[in-house]
Amino acid sequence: MQSYGKAALVGSAGELEHAAAILHPKLGKPFRQAVGSGAAIIPSAKKRGGPGGPLTCPCILKMTPGSSPILMRWKYG
C-alpha cells in the first residue's frame, strides 16, 4: 500500500459527529497498525447523504508527510 485515507457516509438524517466518532478514535490506531506505520497523517472526510450517494475520500502518500491529498470518489449502491 502506498497511500491511504478514510471517509464515512451517514444517512440523510444522521449526525456527522457519529461519522467522526468512528473515523478518529475507533479507526486511526488500528489502521496504522494494519498498514505498518506511516509517516503521514491519515486524512479524513465525512458526509451526509442518501442511499447510493457518492463518497469522496482524501488519500495521501503513506511515507510523505506534508504532501497534498488526492481526492478519490466512489459510488456505492
Image: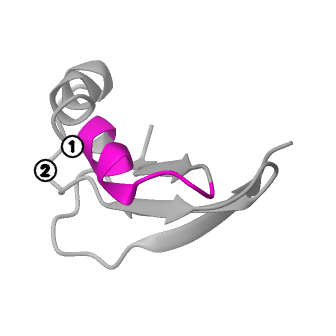
The image quadrant where one finds the N terminus is top left
Real-space Cα distance between discs 2 and 1? 17 Å
Give me the residue at 76% from left, 58% from top.
53
Asked if residue 20 lies in the magenta stretch, the reply is yes
Secondary structure, mark 2, is: loop
**Other-residue count near label 2 (Cα within 10 Å), few / some / many at <14 / 14–19 / ≥20:** few
x%, y% of residue 71? 54, 72
Relative to 51, residue 30 above or below: above
- 22 displayed left or right of 64: right
Prevalent SS, magenta region: helix
What label sits on residue 39 in the rendered view? 2
Residue 30 sits above or below residue 48 on the image:
above
* Extreme residue in the right direction: 77
Mark sitting on residue 24: 1
- Would you place residue 41 above or below residue 68 in this image? above
Residue drawn at the location 29% of the way across and 53% of the way down: 17
Specify the segment rendered in magenta.
Answer: 12-22
Numbered badge on residue 74: none
Of residue 12 and residue 56, the one placed in the foreground of this image is 12
Tell me the amino acid under the disc marked 1.
His
Q: Label 1 neighbourhood size at 10 Å, few (<14), some (14-19), many (20+)?
A: few
Horizontal and vertical percent position of residue 37 = 16, 33
- Of badges 2 and 1, the one in the foreground is 1
- In the image, residue 44 lies in the stretch drawn in magenta: no
Could one spot residue 4 in this view of the protein? yes
Residue 59: horizontal and vertical position, in percent? 44, 60
For marks 2 and 1 on the same chain, the one whose residue lies earlier in the sequence:
1
* Observer-nearest of 72 and 10: 10
Would residue 31 be found to the left or right of residue 47 on screen? left
Residue type, numbered disc 2: Ala
